[in-house]
Amino acid sequence: MRQFASFVRKEFCHILRDKRTLLILLVMPVIQIILFGFAISTDIRNIKIAILDSSQDNVTSYLIRQFEANKYFSVEKLVTSQREIDELFRQNKIDMVVVFENNFSRNIVHDGKASVQLIADGSNPNTATMAVNYASSIFMDYQLKIAQNMNGAASVSQFAAESTTSDIGGTTSVAAVTSSGTVTIIPTVKMLYNPQMKAAYNFVPGVMGLILMLICTMMTSIAIVREKEHGTMEVLLVSPVKPLSIIISKTIPYLVISFINLITIILLAVFVLGVPVSGSMSWLLAISTLFIFVSLSMGMLISTLVKTQAAAMLTSGLVMMMPGMLLSGLMFPVENMPWILQFVSIFVPARWYISAVKTIMIEGSGIAFAAKEVYILLAMAAVFITASLKRFKNRLE
Amino acid sequence: MINRDNIVIRTDQLTKSFGDFTAVDHISFSVEKGEIFGFLGANGAGKTTAMRMLCGLSKPTSGEGFVAGYNIRTQARQIRKNIGYMSQKFSLYEDLKVWENIRLFGGIYGLKEDAIREKTEVLLDKLGMTQQRERLVKTLPLGWKQKLAFSVAIFHEPKIVFLDEPTGGVDPTARREFWEMIYDTADKGITVFVTTHYMDEAEYCDRVSIMVDGRIDALDTPRRLKQTFKAESMDSVFTALAETSTRQSE
Amino acid sequence: MLKYLLEKEFKQLMRNPFMPKLIMFFPLMAMLLFPWAATMTIKNVNIAIVDNSHSTVSQQLTEKIISTGYFKPASFPNSYDKALESVTYGKADVILEIPSDFEENLTKTGVSSIMISANSVDGTKGSLASSYLVSIVSDFATSIQESRSATIQSSMIDIKPYFKFNPGMDYKVFMIPALIVMLLTIICGFLPSLNIVSEKEVGTIEQINVTPISKLMFIAGKLIPYWIIGIIVISIAFAVAYFVYGLAPAGDILSVYLLSFIYILVVSDIGLIISNYSSTMQQAMFVMFFFILILILMSGLFTPVGSMPDWAQWIARFNPLKYFIIIMRSIYLKGSRLSDLLPEIYALLGFFAVFTTWAIASYRKRT
């Protein structure tokens, strides 16, 4: 036991001596939380538009003013030709062009109908869809106004539906004015667990998974392979200490750092981002510990498979982390992926951990609701530990 | 006694500090052309640091030094053209073949393609390694690696070659063969500046300096040093001096 | 002199049991996998429908929702509480509750209500799913209305949306050029960041440092191999984009290559700078990881740069990835010409000048 303690102390010395790595290990979660919490957002705003107004009458100029006043749009330019439009698109100066047809206002008055074309830069489908939706609601608004002026309340069901898409709050209830002949279904939308639609609710569990995997898997595999590469592993192995204790002693400092990070993330989430721990704190820690074990054993397994530090880093970093990030549900929902990727994601431990943390921390449900995840993680831990122990034994004998 | 025109290394109060710690403490000495100059000292006495300053790998904190007539502060690049270096850490590329290592360093020192090819054959023949030319360096025994590293260090025919504990870890036969190579080199007029902590090797040097705690405490031929310290061997000379050390060795 | 250094780097690279495989297979794997994974389109949302009405209309509504392809019926529980439970278990993402008087109200007053509850832990997904559902429901209402009285005019302004450059609104098309940038950044950033520091760890750097080789030559000897690797990597990526996804650049492929040449050097410079300042490979790897993560997240790859707060947008101006992603997306999707992208090209050239100088200056032969 005393020998074991001295090994652990040696490992801590290694880590504490490398101030730069330690700093990064401790600061990384903080930066990530700040980035995800304050810098990155999927909300679309500042949609840059150009307007091609061939009509130039009072209706179009009224509508242009509406675009200028709208918080989602910034009108970059009033153009006069189609050629100019292409140029602006190619130079990334605009996301959408609003094209009013000739005699716009006259057509409304005479035919009761005028057309407007919305040419959106479809290369980014999300921005394009949102841009078209926001623009449509400006036209709907105008139409509603005219309709109300003309005959009190006319067909408004369309408007009611459109406005909900751009105005999603906690609970949105859209009251619509109806008149005879129209059919309206009023949807009440309720956002479960995250009524303020804070992005943090989604990424906090993700960042936890990412950081723990990074430190445990990557650091552990590198630390072990490093000793192999430098030949110092041989020295340790001939000492009277059991090989297993040596390996375990190497993982302990990373275990400690992982816990520090875990606590940092939870504290930042609660006090800076206002994400509460709705469920049981002890279960949250228990599951995190389990995940740390899975990641550590994965790191150990990698260290038995590769010979050089560079290979350990690139295996754990690129081959494990990248799919880990993409297939864990951190950024993109797994359900939308093709079946083959969904199948692969079954073997990504972070996916189950993140899902369990969402259930317990955000949704505040009991552990029973995360039982599946816990069992899968337990099974993974068992497989990884058995496999790496077996390989260690084989190499030593 | 010392011919001034023949001096290839000269230092004057050369000093290197790392924070509060003075690794090399105002050392002054000269080395003549064609000499085998032994640079001795316990671990941590400052020999490697001193040598690194002479090779232009480390900037002096104070004092002056001249190697092959160039100032070590300002003319590091000229110095590098005129020296060879082989370090304690084995310094060939382990994942390159024997001939590839020779070719690489020949090329870096600006030798012509044809010259490299010719000299490689001669060298391999002399080392008795013609059979090994296609082997990766990491598969060679240590003794061969060191001979090869030394040959590579003098491949471009430098004025001075610096050897930092070149024979660490090899058996006595390999060490003797290595020293024969050193003598051959010195005979060609190349100055050999060698650090070692094998005292029997110190006996082979023309002159020896002994560093204790960053200072040079003794500098003379091995014979005269033994006389001065009234000792049987260099080993006893060294022990006598090393006992005065106050610095903890690693 | 450079020739010998390059020979050495390539021999070492080819002899490494791991690197050549990584250079070939990582781009392949990434290009086959990432575009499918990195999709924001919401499909197959699991929906739990609580139909308290059991009427023809509610049946029609259910069918309509499922027929759109966005929603997949997970269960038809008989109470809201049961439905909520299936959300907690992760079996359903959205609940649609239809009240018992749904049909009756519709027939009598023309107004009825429904309730949509979406799991919004993932806010984007929750709001997208619920807004899809809302618009399906309103379409449904309109279709009933139209079937009852065909005379009511629905709208006065005819809005014709047209999605230029990507009429199929395929999210993969949007992501692929940017994913190529990410791939290039990872490979041409990480490998050089490990290179110099690994020579430091092994000790061979000393041997190089005592040679008269100049800093410029040394850095060039390190940069050029990654430049060539980068060209291989993008060529693989372009081929996969074309043969697997049918995506060819709308603009000139030569301009894509030309600008990639500059960009590869920029990221390899960053790797070498980090390698120069690091003393162990572990340290280099983590510093690199740290920066690449920030660079990728703030590049506009996953989320639009324009949506970031002003301070973050200001920081993003110093992110070379941002410019190259704009370049790749513009040339690939919009057919932009070099003259359209001058600000971005100048930015890349600026980065190249600064980082190359920095890489050369930070390589220290002496300590």
Image (cartoon, grey):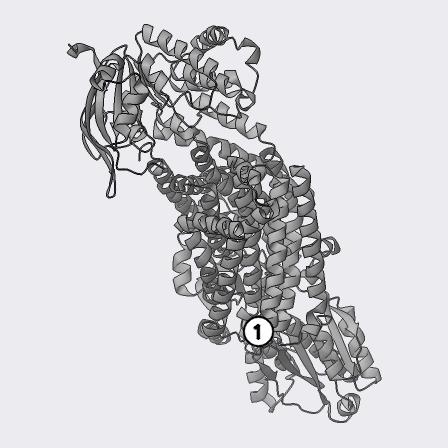
**Would you say residue C277 is visible in this rendering?**
yes
Q: Position of residue A395 (x, y in %)?
A: 66, 38
Chain for disc number 1: A
Q: Position of residue B221 (x, y in %)?
A: 24, 14
Is residue C25 shown above or below C213? below
What residue is at 44 percent from the left and 19 percent from the top?
A: B149
- Indicate left or right for C185 with C158 as reference: left
Farthest-out residue, bottom: C108
Asked if residue C43 shows in the view, the reply is no
Q: Which residue is mark 1?
A: A281
Vertical placement of residue A46 versus B49, above or below: below
> Which percent across, then down, holds residue A316?
58, 47
Q: Position of residue B202 (x, y in %)?
A: 32, 17
Exactly how many numbered labels are in the figure? 1
Q: Residue at x 62, y 75 (%)?
A: A363
Considering only vertical position in the picture, is C296 above or below B15?
below
Residue at left 41%, top 54%? A23
Q: Quadrant of residue C240?
A: top right
| Quadrant position of the N terminus of chain B in the picture | top left
- Depth check: give the residue in front, A47 or A5: A5
Please name the amino acid that badge 1 sits on. Answer: Met
- Residue C97 or A310: which is nearer the viewer? A310
The one nearer the camera, C174 or B209, is B209
Quadrant containing the C terminus of chain B is: top left
Name the foreground residue: C304 vs A375.
A375
